[in-house]
Amino acid sequence: MALRGGNARHARNFRIAHDAPLWHTPGAYPAAEFSAELAKISGDRPEETLAGALIEESAQVASWLMGCGVRLQAPDRGVLPYSRRTAFLLGGGKAMINALYATAARIGVAIAYDSEVLALTPTRDGGWEAEIATGGATRRLNARAVVLASGGPGADPAWRRAHFGGNADDILIRGSSYSNGRLMQRLVESGAQTVGDPSSCHMVAVDARGPAVDGGIVTRITAIPQGLVVDRHAGTVEIAGAAPGKSHYAQWGPRIAQCDGGLAFLILDADGVSRSLPTALAPIAAPTLETLADALALDGAALASSVAAFNQGARAIVRPPFSAFPMRAGLTFVHFGLAVDADMRVAENLFAAGMIATPNFFTRFYLAGLGLTLSAVTGRRAGEAAARALA
Amino acid sequence: MPSPDAAGEAERIVKICAACMYCDGLCPVFPALTGRNDDIAQLANLCHNCRACWYACQYAPPHPLAVNAPATFSRARMETYADHVWPRALRHVFVRPALGAGLMLAATLLTFALLTAMAGAPRSGPGAFYALIPWGAMATLATAALAWATLSLTVSTRRYWRTISAGLSPSPLKPALRRALSDIITLRHLDGGGPGCHDSGLPFSRRRKIFHHLMAGSMVLAVAATLAAAVFEHFLGAKPPFPLTSLPVLLGLAGGVGIVVGAAGLLAVEARMDRDPSDPGETRLNVSFLIALELVTLSGLALLVFRETPAMSPLLLAHLSLVIGFFVGLPASKAIHAPFRAAALLRAALERDVFPRKRITL
């Protein structure tokens, strides 16, 4: 129960179209602007109707969530710069999840925690039979309509090995361990249509010392522009086409995943550290580059030569103490899911919502706050369509 | 990954919170965090233990990062009491709160023995109280206990203020004082950023704030009753016990009932509270203070009700002893949280002038 809520428990804000300032979201974010930004990450998707529905219904998400007891944050509170594109949750995603579960319980929704759907099979009368395991017990439930919100496949190690190749086991998972895509995989095996690329995902650089799953936002390494990235052989790691020192957040994840052992190190001097934002885990620090190399089990001479080459550039690593963050790729989500129509329908009386359906809307990169908006919009659409199916 | 020592654990938690900042709208603690050399002594008392961040935290146990900010600050708060209380010997009370209850009890019993030894023959009507215990003895004891409590709490608070104000850039005091005073009187930070505290688990509630207001407000009434009694006695020549409809009695009665209800409400809240987001030592400190306050107040109310009966004389002795014992133990009790939190709120208000509110970036 403490880990309920999927990846939404790690969310902070959600993207909403609005033409005038709202008490929680200042300025304006016109639908046309949202549409243009979504088009940049959607490739040949989404179909016009889906994109239009997403943007139009994004405008209702804030008031709908507040109606379900979720609190939003006023823009003059707190320290984070606020955005006209996204509304912020007071207390973050888990506070929202708590409010939503409380509302669900109040209106009589039965909730089974620590349960897994082992199988979902169509019944003769057009409904579905779910085989559900809770602890050691298995039971069967018949439903006239089912909404799947079981998440994308990223947290399943076997799935990653099958699609990500060599360093799949070296990747850390930023979200829920329950987002393992197994139910999705079973439906695909029985003929459900998929969308997106199973080998494409959103990854960022994270602290290698962080937890293997559920790291969320705090293990991100944001200081890459302040220093030098080397691999485990102390050789310089760069992103082809990017100016040295420039950080492209979501490009560093895949780049680090390609390094030997899926491991890289961000090397900073004292000035680099002071230019960086605070981190959840303190960097590994040493008085000299040689002792830092020892602490990281790197070749000292190779590190010295990489740093010397780096120091020819605009920023130099010269002032002790020297610090390092060991880094791995942190997987946020995979651009792969089940194909749906405008009612979020996967098959007759079977609907999908949340990350399992988002590749219908975008298949590259990410926009801040889009995941939660998509989850809310697809969830409401799927729920309404399922209710209509029962009528 | 929790750290075994308190300081290390506080530093670990604060770094994670500074990197996350999802709670920056809940209370003033999070906006004050930088993740680098944060002043835990200041943050610990800025935290009102509303627990909003505990229920909102995606890194709370069973997550391996095991973040528990309120319990960490609760423990750190007890350390700020221990580190700054004067005289230094009282620090042990904040390590073992049972000692504080023991101190109050011992002072009460000692006073009771002393008063019993000097008590005169009981009679009734005006002047009955002073016939039992001479005015001089009563006034001396009460003044000494009150002076001791005031002196100790003042010195302790000064010591704490010196710790948290070190390195504070000079800024105008007046607007900061006004803001801090408003935060103190309204207990704004028991709101969890709006919806309220978590008194008994996930649901939001304002019970703790309401009962605290009732109790603190009633204490003000009780003080007003004492002042009114002094005025009656010295300027109007009246001798206690005063008539039931007189100002001191009415104020005392309202204050007494308010304290009894408020403290009982807070005890009920403590009994139902989640234990996880608090330090057990702080909970014991809270509970023993509330019980002591209830005993003092109930004995006063009982004296009012039974003052015309033979029970008056033991009740007066008991009430006076409890009052004296309460004030003797006050500097090493939960009472210390009030000036310490006020100091932390003042520093936060002063800092807000140094670091103005966030810019609007559109």
Image (cartoon, coloured by chain):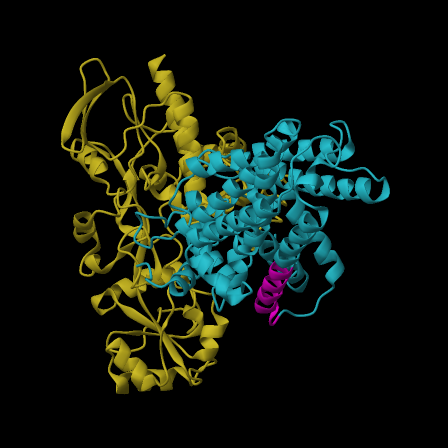
Q: Residue A21 occupies which quadrant of the picture?
A: top right
Q: Residue B345 occupies which quadrant of the picture?
A: bottom right
Write down the colour of chain A: yellow
Q: Mark yes or no: residue A191 visible.
A: yes
Write down the colour of chain B: cyan
- On the picture, is A58 further left or further right than A375? right
The stretch drawn in magenta includes residue A207: no
Residue B176: x and y in percent read 70, 57
Residue visible at 43% across and 56% down?
A: B75
Front-most of A298 and B259? B259
- On the picture, is A191 further left or further right than B263? left
Residue A317: x and y in percent read 42, 82
Residue A8: x and y in percent read 39, 42
Front-most of A194 and A164? A164
Q: Residue A190 occupies which quadrant of the picture?
A: top left
Residue visible at 35% across and 44% down?
A: A7
Front-most of B356 and A315? B356
In the rendered view, tell whether residue A24 sits above or below residue B356: above
Residue visible at 37% across and 50% down?
A: B59
Residue B356: x and y in percent read 66, 60
Front-most of A76 and B298? B298
Highlighted range, magenta? B151-167
Q: Mark yes or no: residue A73 visible.
A: no
Q: Is the magenta stretch mostly helix, strand or loop?
A: helix
